[in-house]
Each structure stands twice: as structure tokens, then as C-alpha cells.
Image (cartoon, rainbow, N blue to C red):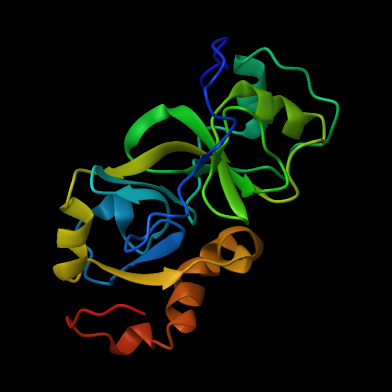
Amino acid sequence: MTRKSTEKPTDKTTDLSDASGYLTGHVLVAMPQMEDPRFSRSVVYICAHTPDGAMGLVVNKLVDSVTFPDLLEQLDLKSNAENDKIHVHFGGPVETGRGFVLHSADYIQDATLVINDKVALTATVDILKAMADGNGPNSSLLALGYAGWAPGQLDQEIQANGWLTVPADDDLIFGSKLESRWELAMAKMGIDFSKLSGAAGHA
């Protein structure tokens, strides 16, 4: 988690919802034959997808070695609320020491990246303090690290049958049980994953 910059941004928020033709705001669902063990049976929310590449957060895997109270202690933040229910997720293999909070759009600050009218992303200490005080967003997912793709790389992986795509919803990102999100994503596409072949396709 990086501390909030003292520089004033030129725009209050950054809106990626106009990136038509790309997968911003969608979910990637790993195919059963996914070869990369880091993404086996993973569900990834795409925060940004442009000609310059893509960035997303895995939403169905936890980091066992770190707890939210641990992070608060490392950042010397005091807590006025019960934080045992806030889990730390494995967001992806890139910059695993950096924290990101994917959250509902009811919480917006200067450094927040607005993904669409329902979901936003914030990566400053301020949101952790708000969550610790019980004043954070209504829905949130705290992750360490992220998944990143070079220009054209994600498109190639989808064409190579590595991923299926499905529009995201609150239940899939924030509401459903962590261990069942992969199966839920498959079910939303009407797919019986036990019968999947190597055939590619988009939902």
C-alpha cells in the first residue's frame, strides 16, 4: 500500500468505463486446463484493459501469511473497529507488496480509479484507515499484488483457451463465498465445468 501523494491530481477521478471493445469491468474465469498454477481456478476482475495492456485483481484467493490487523500494524495505523472479518486476498503475482482495494463506488477520493458506476479501485493508505475505523466503502476486497498483461497478451491468452469472460456483478466480486466464486462464475455462463473441452468461447 503506498501512501497518498501530496501532489494534487489534475482530475478528481479517472473513468475507464468508456473503453468500449475491451474487458474493463468484466471477469476472467480460468479454464480448467490453465497451466499457470498461480491462476489455477482463479476469477480475475479486470480493472483496466486498453491497447497498452490490462490489469486485474484475483478475487477468489487469500494470502494466508498476512491479516488485515498485520497490515495496520505495519503501517502504524490505529483501529477503532473489529477487523477480523476483513481478509487479505492474493491479487496477483505483480508487486505483491503493494495493496489495492477493489470496492463499491460509494467511496471516492482524489486517488480513486473509477472503473464504472458500481466499482472503483483505491490504492492509498487512506482507504485502509477508513476501513479500520468502520468508515470504508459498503463493499470492499483488499488484495496484495495484481495481475498484469502486456499489450495484446490477454487477448492472446483468451484466444488460446486460457480464459473465459463474463460480465461482473456484485455477488461474484463481493457477495459470494470465496471458495465457490469460480464455480459461480462458470454457472453464470451456463457452463458445467466438468464437461468443458478445449473449445474457446466468450460468455
Residue at 62 percent of width and 27 percent of height = 110
Q: Is residue 100 above or below residue 27?
A: above
Q: Is residue 149 above or below residue 201?
A: above
How far across and how far down the image is residue 87, in percent? Answer: 62, 43
Tell me: 31 left or right of 18: left
Q: Quadrant of residue 98?
A: top left
For the question of whether residue 76 can be seen, the reply is yes
**Residue 53 in the image: above or below residue 167:** above
Query: In the rendered image, which quarter contains the C terminus?
Result: bottom left
Which residue shows up at 18% across the image and 83% down it? 199
Residue 141 visible to an observer of this rendering: no
Residue sitting at the far front: 10
- Residue 54: image x %, image y %? 30, 47
Residue 38 in the image: state x and y as whole percent. Answer: 30, 50
Residue at the spot 30% in from the left edge and 49% down from the top edge: 50
Q: Which of the two residues, 183 or 10, is positioned nearer the viewer here?
A: 10
Q: Is residue 97 left or right of residue 85?
A: left
